[in-house]
Amino acid sequence: MRRPSTPRAFLLTLAAVWGVLPAFAAVPDYVREVKPILTQHCVRCHGAAKEEAGLRLDTAANARLGGASGSVVRTPGGRESLLLAVVLGTHEDIPAMPYKKPPLGAAEIALLKAWVDAGAPAPEQEEPGRFEHWAYRSPARPAVPAVAAAPAGWTSNPIDAFILQRLAAVKLPPAPEADPVTLLRRAALDLTGLPPTPAEVDAFLADRAPGAWERAVDRLLASPHHGERWARPWLDVARYGDSNGYSIDAPRQIWKYRDWVVSALNRDLPYDQFIVEQLAGDLLPGATVEQRIATGFNRNTQINQEGGIDPEQFRIESVLDRVNTYGTAFLGLTVSCAQCHDHKFDPISHRDYYQLFAFFNSSVDDGHGGRRSRSTGVLTLSPEGRVDEGLEARVAEAQEKLEALFTAHAAAIEAWRQALPAEKRATQRPASVRAALDVPWEKQSFAQRRSVYPLARPGDADFKALSAALTELQRAVPGAITTLVMEELPEPRPSHLFVQGDFTRLGERVEPGTPAILPPLRAAGPRPNRLDLARWTADPSHPLTARVIVNRVWLQYFGLGLVETENDFGSQGIPPSHPELLDWLATEFTARGWSLKALHRLIVTSATYRQSSNAREDLALVDPLNRLLSRQQRLRLDAELVRDAALTASGLLVPRLGGPPVYPPQPDGVMSLGQVKREWKASTGEDRYRRGLYTHFWRATPHPALAVFDAADGFSSCTRRLRSNTPLQALTLLNDQQFYEFAEGLADRVLRERPGAPLPEQLAHAFRLSTARRPSAFERDRLASLFARRLAAETGEPAARQRAAWIAVARVLLNLDETITRE
Amino acid sequence: MNPTLTPQNWPDFLAARTRRHFLSRCAVGLGGIALASMLNQARGAGAAPAGPLAPKPTHFPARAKNIIYLFMAGGPSQLELFDYKPKLAELNGQPIPQSFIEGKRFAFMDSSHGTRLMGTRRQFAQHGRSGMWVSELFPHTARIVDDLTMVKSCQATLFNHAPAKLFMNTGSGQFGRPSMGSWLNYGLGSECQDLPGFVVLQSGPRGPRGGAVNWGSGFLPTTYQGVPFRGTGEPILNLTRPAAVTADGQRDALDALRDLNLQRSVATGDPEIATRIAAYEMASRMQSSAPELIDLKAESAATLKSYGIEDQRPSFARNCLLARRLVERGVRFVQLYHTNWDSHGGPGENLQADFEKVCREVDQGQAALVQDLKERGLLQDTLVIWGGEFGRTPMGENRDTTGRNHHIDAFTMWFAGGGTKAGQVIGETDELGFNAVRDPMHVHDLHATILHLLGLDHTRLTFRFQGRDFRLTDVHGKVNHQLFA
């Protein structure tokens, strides 16, 4: 789904119908109203630093003076001034301004016009304006605007005051409140990802006491399914997956991290703590098992197990991915450009980037996922969830003893290897041993050495004993639960700039540090580490952290963030639609102890949230993208929730939380699309009916019912899913084996729960199970006619015919646009 | 003011409703226009295409409309097929001069073998009026050389399979970028209302490395991603209705669904519902058009014989014929993957019997495809691309049997039709076949040139994501005008 996004055309239309712009009776105040616009949008290219086209707009005098094309504010012969022409994009030769950026808002253009029309008055003595990007300044707490004449039910909540203030400025009334059933389904899907049951709807409708809405919201926030619903967007950001990616895409165990996120959200772990534990839980004094599991955030990188790779290259890829993900997840900045060069538009320098890199460059994991003698950041847990330190330590100890043996005989084995005749080499089996013999001893992996050693030194009793002991220990490991965690090397690796991002071309050495444009880092020790970075990030005065997360939470509720470019708060991003509201929310969030549940409650109890999502024809011209939020938004459910909604309606859902990934059925042949053909053995029993969150996610060959509904791919950090609308989605809902099972489940459930009831009542029940509301007369009649047609077409026993006709009705209900949409 | 809704009048009903809703929106974008045309078509044909895939204008007149990309997965050895190097044979067994390899990085760079030159054991001859060199392994392809532009100086950046294959498809070794087929459907829309605009067919012993990301849509909407078709059985996942549902039952369900969705579209005014109604209609048409597509009954015995299709089994040759049938039906981008060209030497991957086998698997089908397209007048609008993610080194890898390592400094690709010049060779390699010494053509240049043939300026085909405008060619790419007729 792409929105028709041509704001420039919109403005041209506005220009044509000038009347709709806010009228300004008085001449605008240059210093207070005009100069900030010029400073914000023009001065970076037309200022002291860079005089594009010989023009500076940092003072009114400079604007009057003009540049290569003359004065920009004079209006010769009643024609538009140059300034107006270029911001409207109507000039024949000069491209629309701001250059390659979103155009100014209607109100801003109106201010400029009024100012130019009045002859561009300004004080004599003027300090030149200097560009300073809003997002790099800490948010100041704005006053909540006073709103006169609010509609009923509004201004109960400061959010509404900010929204109403903007709507009043363009004389738009907000939309009416959605009906209660739509509202409850909206909140249930938004807060738990599961539609409400008919009983829950009835209870909500029956609660006439004041505070019914708040009670419903609190009940949903307390549900254990809340954590499942909100874990998913976070796991998208964390690029979670259950396989190693790249071409081999072997399975991996890291679901303990997924369960950690669900649990952290359910117990409302304060967001600052949430950050610290994920970025540096392993470095916390006395780190708990849970805190170490949380560091899986940084282990969701891909691992390349292809033959012939340079492991160092892919270790570095992982570190780069950690830097980029850190920038996207916490700072809302696209730092990756600075990997190769100074960021073209933002003040994140090449050096800043590699200073961040240095924080992540000293973990123990290698680039190949191989196991050398030392641990590579794998935590082994007993089924009860305790770390089996004993086992891990014993494996490591056995490996170290073998390594010692290998080291002791290194020179002799290498000499033997080099002297080995080609014919002898060629007859070795299996192929992995042949391959190992081609690699110098020094560079062989532990496994390779273990296979080569007995060839070079047959009959070495020490080796036999140690190797057998290790095998015995390793046999105990596969049954154990493992999870990938961050673990620091005893000595940090040196970090360097990479010239043009190429890791083979080392530039100057860098130490860990944070971007110069942001507040300074205070390190606890002599050399800053990940824990220092985490604490710096989670500081309440950090200009980005709180704004970025409240904006991402907001976008889940309204489809778009207050900053539409939720992953780019930099100067290339789109400025916030409601800057004061964003800052108010950010400061409110930190003031309430970084409580995400408090933030959810604040948003969901606002009148803004409770508006109807129906389209409004009166918005077409003034606010086609609904940036001013004079209505709610219809949002197609995320991939996992499409499944969950159908599962819930069918009554088949197994609501158990957590545990290893599951394998709901999928069409044959999906797994053969990757390089390595893997088996997908469909789960039977309860695991067949778990929520979409738990479906095993193969990065190279994701479950098609997830991929087709735009699930995140797990390759890189994803802050907002697209919402496409395609024929393949239609085929999935219509024909997929599981969705057919769900339709059978829904049909059986209706016959079970409303046996012998009149058809209209049965239909209403089925409709409520799918959409929460009762059908209209047209809808009920249309379904009744389908039922009658199918009943007549079916043959056989009456009960079988009735069931078949009900399955037809259930399939239609589960395919409804409304069923897979949050209205 | 709303008339009664019936299955017969739904397009008019929807039109009346959405006209009110959208005519006022025309000024704000293409959405209204696309929908208006959709509704016109819906009324005319009783069927509506999805909005995002509606045909879009090119930047300048196009030379080609469709692409058939024969992707030789694994990296075929140009030195055994097209790039004839007698000098290499003469120096067989000698170490490669240090000047060639200094400062270079290779796949399997730790391995101790693979530094000695190895001449080909294959016989080469010149063919056609153009006198192009082709080895004995491609007898059928040798007969179509006068229809080809052969580029011997292709260059890539990455030398491991998965990243290199991604690079060839998306212009980047990183996951998450859209593939060329996605970019083209995004830029041009689809001319086909019954099938997806980007179809992928696969053959050979295993899937291509990296899998579905090679035809993914990255950050573009999934509407534009490649849809893998299987050459036999059910061509698209979930295409077949559930076993217990009859054709009538399916139609009845779809009719009821459309009416109820329409009712909701009226109630909410959300244009997404109109798109969803159209998507269901397209899905319904695909249920008949896709099985019809893979049913080769209508093809003559002579056609099947020319491709070398002897039975119902999936094969590259069969996929070549399906590719022709797909472009006949207006599918914009058809991509065929065939494995395994990864000739390192050793069992299954040697330059002896294994290489001969994979050559036999593709030779007749690819030559027949070009010939067939030409005879049917489709070649002028269809660009055929042949090549892998990289080539192979002039140095040999001597295991039980011989092979060659991955090579990115010079390899051969060929093109036919779609406005390319027939019967020419572009570029040249040094006497060992190591470096491109004339007219090097990097993957980015290749992408820029292909987009140009389709009427798109590679610098103007952009999508804004994560705060910047992305292109298939990133910040690179030069259009190579030598390719054009």
Image (spheres, rainbow, N blue to C red):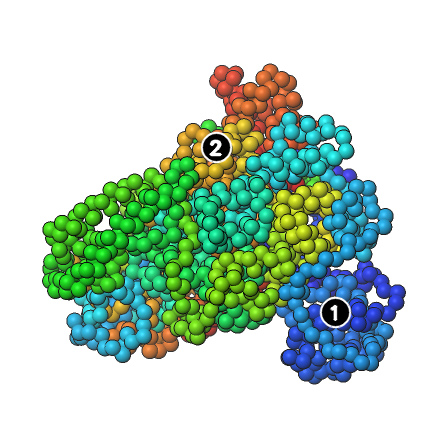
Residue B385 seen in this snapshot: no
Q: Which mark is residue A355?
A: none
Q: Which mark is residue A36?
A: 1
Left or right, A106 with respect to B397, comes to right
Q: Is residue B388 above or below residue A811?
A: below
Residue count near mark 2 (Cα–Cα under 10 Å), binned few <14, some 14–19, many ≥20: many
Residue B170: quarter of image: bottom left
> Which residue sits at x=72%, y=65%?
A104
Q: How far apart are the alpha carbons under marks 2 and 1?
A: 56 Å
Badge count: 2
Residue A146 image offset from top left, x and y in percent? 82, 52
Q: Which mark is residue A689?
A: 2
> Which residue sits at x=43%, y=74%?
A507
Lower position in the chain sequence, tag 2 or tag 1: 1
Residue count near mark 1 (Cα–Cα under 10 Å), binned few <14, some 14–19, many ≥20: some
Residue A171 image offset from top left, x and y in percent? 82, 53
